[in-house]
Image (cartoon, rainbow, N blue to C red):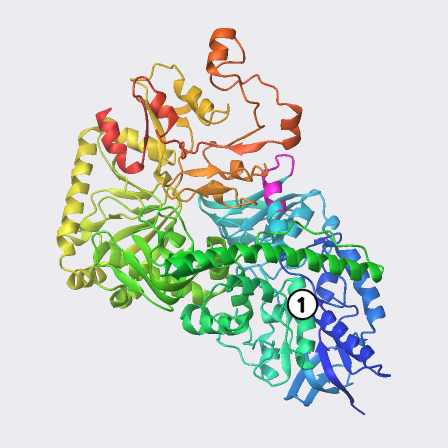
């Protein structure tokens, strides 16, 4: 006889356990003799994925802003403790768990499901909740040898290995945790194909950055790298892995490779159950409604397979889905937080209705899973542009009142929960401080979101109203509902081009860079859509400013984007050219051979073109083009170039003027080899990625060190530059001082987000620095120091007349106070005196005018004068 249940839950992971636990609550409340639910698990034990976590692994309970709602206990802690707690909770809640039961198929719909089991004990159910996860289908490396024993896709016990060279591939939580555990008794390299750990939980992010920056831990990272080839280890000897890195190919000897590249949803099984996927993309997940129900009535999906691999999220979903099945309309755990984000908007709609409206109005977000879109909104800001001044003032007052009430509500809810836990014999939770609630941001109806030249990189989408994009020398563009902007700075790292101004009553979503990077890494459709518009607007800006960017769609589809690592040759002198290049990011060194060797004849930067002479009458390349730093360029071939000019013939004159100026510069440098050599010196030291660099003319410098003294006096007694340690060539000294890079290396992976960029371009560190040292390690130019806070010195007159204190400048012999040692070291760097009205103190204090802060475009002008 086939057993029948009201609810069958497939998979005893965190989400499935929570769902079954809540179903058991209802069974117990109804005083049933037999359970109306069953939890089926193919493995011998509950939570198989966590059972397979490495021993001793610390399991985190992010996201921190969500409260847990589940009959089962869960708080951050060791894997073993969490599994033991859940084992006890299974018994105490009365969960009807059947292990060693693999589900091979599901058919039917609500009220009439048949579940086929491998042990032959088939069951029927009114409703089915699928919580099977994705961990059984690891993603492979995609190179020869990736199925050999040399490559492992799972790490059960890191203590099994010692004194080995191990390479861990991946940038997610599993990769980080495996790498850190292995580093306890092995030498470990972790390979991240991107420039940052954008998908990691905050705790893991902090931990991996600390390890990378600790010289006492045998742990390093290769950023921006991918696997090119394997040499398989044999007979106990080490093999090797060859990586493509920004500096070129690198081969690392290693005894084993741990590949943690994520997993692929078990699509065949899911589709065989009748569940549809929105696309053929291998990364695609099933489309679900707000209640986690699939296209099959009565068949629900929760947890990792629904796109939410975090434990707390899955457990909350497990609780919620049972309530939905029981006919109880509960609000998701993030509902109150989202309500605050929408609180001041002119809507009377519920949170779920607003979210559905936003996805409907914004095509890019319509491609996202509903649950993933909730998370994006949680991490974004909502702007409301208000045309009426009185209404604006009233909304700002309401905003303050909402903030105070939210804090009161959180304190009250925490007290009530602690009382319930005490009555149940459970200890009070250890909680973080109450975070500042994020409430609708209110703007005047003509506010600027950013201005031309600002260094910001958030991404905007328009829900209602209009935004005016004002381009210098080009046609203004009005964007409306469903459109987005800000992608050019997001993708290129360059400052904003043009102004963005709210026009009338407008509602906007502003998403931070890190969230967008994470989204683009996870969602190919979104990434491709943003990239397509980026190319259209880039072509509009540089070649057809009076043509709408949408009219350039077909041309944008035909151009290609290429990446070049440091030193890569893009083209060589004497070659035949058939394309020009637009620099998306980085700097190119143009050199020409001469009797004196190669000399620099140009240094085009981000946002400039080069190689255009091949399309303007001289097909033979007159110079060699190499990447000075890691570069990204857009290649435009002759047919696309001619079509752009056909659409915008007035651009010909501007292109000719720009090309003439470039040729004049080339001739100037070629005629003065000394200046060209200095340019080469600067580019070789990475100045091509700078936006604001300090150089000193040693023909004028008298060695007074006023620059360092002034820097220290301006920054609390700690100098942010080192003149003597600077690299020198001819009469130019390149001191150790921040260059305020176009894409600042130091800003990557700052755990407290303490490094910022002023709208005018200066990069600075705020007081929230925790002293992890990651920025110091990431900076390739050695301009960041870790120092203790300094005591306030006596004033200048006290030193002059009474000899008190060490005098002006940094006291290198000063011992840190006990308070400073307790506080710990913090990162310090040149901020180009961003808050000083008179500008950089180092430049102002130089008595001979030897010190100058310039951007790369000014190199030739300044060097030629000097």
Tell me, yes or no, if residue 606 can be seen here. yes
Residue 347 image point, x, y percent: 47, 70
Secondary element type, mark 1: helix
Residue sitting at x 72%, y 82%: 7
Tell me, yes or no, if residue 234 can be seen here. no
Q: In this view, does 557 lie to the left or right of 316?
A: left
Farthest residue in the front direction? 390
**Magenta span: chief secondary structure:** helix
Magenta stretch in the rendered image: 207-217
Q: Is residue 672 left or right of residue 164?
A: left
Q: How many callouts does the rendering have?
A: 1
Residue 833 image point, x, y percent: 40, 31
Quarter of the figure with residue 820 = top right
Residue 151 image point, x, y percent: 62, 56
Question: Nearest the camera: 163 or 483?
Answer: 483
Residue sitting at x 63%, y 79%: 300
Question: Nearest the camera: 535 or 421?
Answer: 421
Which quarter of the image is occupied by the N terminus?
Answer: bottom right
Q: Is residue 629 left or right of residue 772?
A: left
**Residue of label 1:** 316
Q: Is residue 214 magenta?
A: yes
Residue 691 image point, x, y percent: 35, 39
Quarter of the figure with residue 139 = bottom right
Which quarter of the image is occupied by the C terminus?
Answer: top left
Is 850 rendered above or below residue 744? Answer: above
User: Crowdedness of circle 1 by 10 Å Cα count: few (<14), some, many (20+)?
Assistant: many
Q: Does the magenta stretch include residue 537?
A: no
Residue sitting at x 67%, y 25%: 818
Q: In this view, does 325 lie to the left or right of 572?
A: right
Is 675 rendered above or below residue 381? Answer: above
């Amino acid at each position: 006889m086939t057993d029948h249940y009201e609810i069958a839950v497939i998979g005893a992971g965190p989400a499935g356990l929570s769902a079954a636990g809540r179903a058991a609550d209802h069974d117990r409340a109804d005083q049933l003799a037999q359970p109306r639910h069953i939890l089926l698990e193919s493995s011998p034990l509950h939570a198989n994925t966590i059972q397979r976590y490495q021993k001793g692994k610390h399991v985190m309970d992010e996201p921190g802003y969500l409260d847990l709602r589940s009959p089962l206990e869960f708080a951050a802690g060791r894997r073993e403790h969490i599994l033991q707690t859940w084992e006890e909770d299974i018994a105490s809640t009365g969960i009807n768990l059947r292990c060693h039961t693999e589900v091979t198929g599901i058919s039917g719909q609500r009220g009439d499901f048949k579940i086929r089991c491998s042990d032959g004990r088939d069951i029927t159910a009114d409703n089915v909740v699928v919580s099977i996860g994705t961990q059984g289908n690891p993603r492979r490396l995609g190179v020869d040898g990736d199925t050999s024993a040399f490559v492992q896709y799972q790490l059960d016990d890191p203590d099994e290995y010692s004194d080995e060279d191990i390479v861990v591939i991946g940038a997610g939580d599993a990769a980080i945790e495996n790498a850190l555990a292995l580093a306890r008794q092995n030498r470990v390299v972790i390979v991240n194909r991107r420039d940052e750990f954008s998908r990691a939980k905050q705790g893991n992010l902090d931990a991996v950055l600390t390890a990378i920056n600790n010289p006492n831990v045998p742990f390093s990272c290769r950023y921006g790298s991918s696997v090119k080839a394997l040499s398989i280890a044999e007979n106990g000897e080490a093999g090797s892995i060859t990586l493509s890195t920004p500096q070129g190919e690198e081969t690392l000897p290693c005894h084993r490779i741990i590949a943690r590249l994520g997993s692929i949803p078990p699509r065949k099984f899911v589709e065989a159950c009748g569940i549809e996927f929105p696309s053929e993309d291998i990364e695609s997940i099933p489309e679900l409604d707000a209640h986690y129900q699939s296209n099959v009535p009565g068949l629900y999906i929760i947890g990792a397979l629904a796109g939410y691999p975090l434990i707390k999220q899955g457990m909350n979903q497990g609780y919620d889905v049972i309530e939905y099945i029981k006919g109880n309309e509960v609000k998701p755990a993030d509902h109150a937080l989202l309500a605050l984000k929408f609180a001041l908007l002119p809507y009377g709609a519920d949170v779920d209705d607003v979210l559905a409206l936003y996805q409907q109005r914004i095509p890019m977000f319509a491609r996202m899973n509903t649950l993933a879109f909730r998370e994006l909104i949680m991490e974004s800001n909502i702007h409301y542009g208000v045309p009426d001044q009185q209404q604006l003032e009233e909304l700002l007052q309401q905003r303050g009142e909402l903030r105070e009430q939210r804090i009161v509500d959180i304190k009250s809810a925490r007290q009530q929960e602690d009382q319930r836990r005490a009555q149940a014999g459970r200890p009070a939770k250890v909680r973080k401080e109450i975070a500042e609630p994020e409430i609708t941001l209110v703007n005047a109806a003509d506010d600027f979101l950013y201005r031309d030249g600002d260094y910001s990189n958030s991404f905007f989408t328009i829900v209602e109203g209009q935004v005016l994009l004002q381009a210098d020398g080009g046609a203004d563009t009005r964007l409306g509902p469903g459109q987005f902007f800000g992608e050019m700075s997001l993708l290129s790292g360059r400052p904003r081009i043009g102004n963005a101004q709210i026009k009338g009553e407008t509602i906007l979503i502003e998403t931070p860079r890190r969230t967008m990077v994470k989204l683009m890494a996870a969602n190919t459709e979104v990434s491709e859509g943003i990239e397509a518009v980026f190319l259209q607007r880039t072509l509009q800006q540089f070649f057809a400013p009076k043509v709408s960017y949408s009219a350039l769609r077909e041309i944008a589809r035909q151009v290609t984007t290429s990446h070049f690592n440091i030193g890569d040759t893009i083209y060589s002198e004497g070659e035949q050219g058939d394309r020009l290049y637009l620099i998306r990011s980085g700097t190119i060194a143009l050199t020409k051979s001469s009797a004196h060797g190669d000399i620099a004849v140009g240094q085009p930067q981000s946002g400039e073109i080069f190689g255009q002479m091949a399309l303007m009458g001289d097909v033979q390349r007159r110079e060699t083009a190499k990447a000075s730093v890691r570069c990204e360029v857009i290649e435009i071939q002759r047919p696309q170039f001619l079509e752009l000019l056909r659409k915008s013939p007035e651009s010909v004159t501007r292109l000719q003027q720009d090309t003439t100026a470039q040729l004049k510069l080339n001739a100037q440098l070629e005629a003065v080899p000394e200046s060209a050599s200095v340019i080469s010196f600067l580019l070789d030291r990475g100045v091509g990625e700078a936006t604001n660099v300090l150089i000193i003319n040693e023909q004028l410098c008298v060695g007074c060190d006023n620059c360092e003294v002034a820097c220290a006096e301006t920054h609390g007694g700690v100098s942010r530059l080192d003149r003597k340690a600077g690299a020198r060539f001819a009469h130019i000294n390149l001191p150790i001082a921040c260059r305020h890079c176009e894409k600042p290396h130091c800003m990557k992976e700052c755990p407290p987000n303490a490094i910022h960029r002023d709208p005018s371009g200066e990069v600075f560190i705020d007081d929230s620095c925790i002293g992890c040292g990651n920025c110091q390690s990431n900076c390739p130019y050695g301009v960041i120091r870790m120092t203790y806070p300094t005591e306030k010195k006596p004033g200048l007159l006290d030193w002059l007349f009474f000899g008190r204190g060490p005098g002006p400048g940094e006291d290198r012999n000063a011992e840190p106070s006990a308070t400073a040692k307790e506080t710990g070291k913090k990162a310090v760097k040149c901020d180009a005196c961003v808050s000083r009205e008179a500008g950089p103190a180092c430049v102002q204090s130089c008595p001979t005018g030897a010190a100058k802060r310039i951007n790369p475009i000014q190199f030739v002008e300044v060097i030629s004068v000097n």
